[in-house]
Image (tube, rainbow, N blue to C red):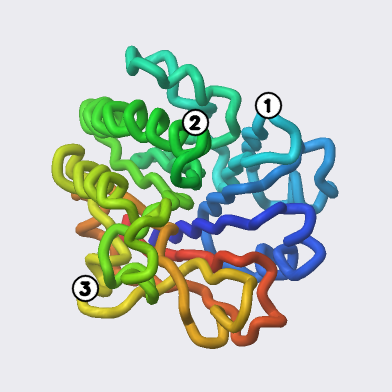
Amino acid sequence: MLTVTSVNVNGLRAAAKKGFVEWLAGTDADVVCLQEVRAELAQLPEGVGTPEGWHTVHAPAAAKGRAGVSLYSRQAPERVQIGFGGFGVPGAEEFDTSGRYVEIDLPGVTVASLYLPSGEVGTERQDEKERFMAAFLPYLQGLKGRAAADGREVVVCGDWNIAHQEADLKNWKANRKSSGFLPEERAWLTRVLEEAAYVDVVRRLHPDVEGPYSWWSYRGRAFDNDSGWRIDYQMVTPGLAGRAVKAWVERAATHGERWSDHAPVTVVYER
């Protein structure tokens, strides 16, 4: 089996003080994809930045204290890539030092950790999100083709910051004009699934449920009421998706036990 977990840690240094270390020590995952790390390796305690038994790759953002993605794998990567420039995709180089994408090759599979910009309607943040999406879709298409030529599958894990369908967020009616549920963002995610032919493997395994949500605001009683969003995905090439046997969100038992506003999303694949 290959077990892959993805989680936005909402600041790894803070998460480490609230339970991430204990969670990592207890996980059965073979690969852990982190987003919004918000720290460089030198700023992380040794047991967090380079924990025993793990091979780690950190891709911090050039802007201090922002974004940042990491990959932890039990097995040493065969190849490491930070950013997705250099493949002939217009606009991709803008994000090479933004701490938003890192990928590794393991035997038979490429695993990536993605932190797509969150956006904010009417601001430069939304413009950045749109530029990222415009560059990332053709990259995903090219990645799938290169992997297939090499006999590899692909899983792109992370915080995609878009709820695709109404079943993917509790209060969808109130968020129809909010970044993360805009029609054009949802249409773009449809293109990832249809044109690029990736599979939202958690939805495939849980086709007729609300959620399972992976992010809940710290405001009010969103977590207690399960008023969340499903924005953390594992997007997978069809061959690997067909080998997915189990998927779940590792939702904390109580609000007080959370070490991030996101919860880990875990999928088990047959090798």
N-term-proximal mark, 2 vs 3: 2
Q: In which quarter of the image is the N terminus?
A: bottom left
Residue 72: mark: none
Q: Specify the farthest residue to the front.
A: 122
* Residue bearing the label numbered 1: 62
Residue at 42% over, 49% down: 160
Residue at 32% over, 71% down: 173
Residue 207: mark: 3
Q: Residues within 10 Å of mark 3 (few under 14, many from 20)?
A: few
Q: Which amino acid does label 3 sit on?
A: Pro
Q: Which of 239 and 184 is in front in this view?
A: 184
Nearer the viewer's eye, disc 3 or disc 1? 1
Determine whether 188 is above or below 52 in the image: above
Given contact means CB atoms under 8 Å apart, are the residues at marks 2 and 3 in contact? no
N-term-proximal mark, 1 vs 2: 1
Work out whether residue 244 can be spotted.
yes
Determine whether 210 is above or below 84 in the image: below
Label 2, label 3: how far apart the Cα atoms are: 34 Å
Label 3, label 1: how far apart the Cα atoms are: 39 Å
Nearer the viewer's eye, disc 2 or disc 3? 3
Q: Where is residue 6 in the image (x, y as percent from the top left)?
A: 50, 56
Q: Where is residue 26 in the image (x, y as percent from the top left)?
A: 65, 70
Say which element carries label 2: loop
* Residue bearing the label numbered 2: 78
Determine whether 150 is above or below 93 in the image: below
Q: Which amino acid does label 2 sit on?
A: Glu
Q: Where is residue 186 in the image (x, y as percent from the top left)?
A: 27, 51
Q: In this view, does 171 lie to the left or right of 47?
A: left
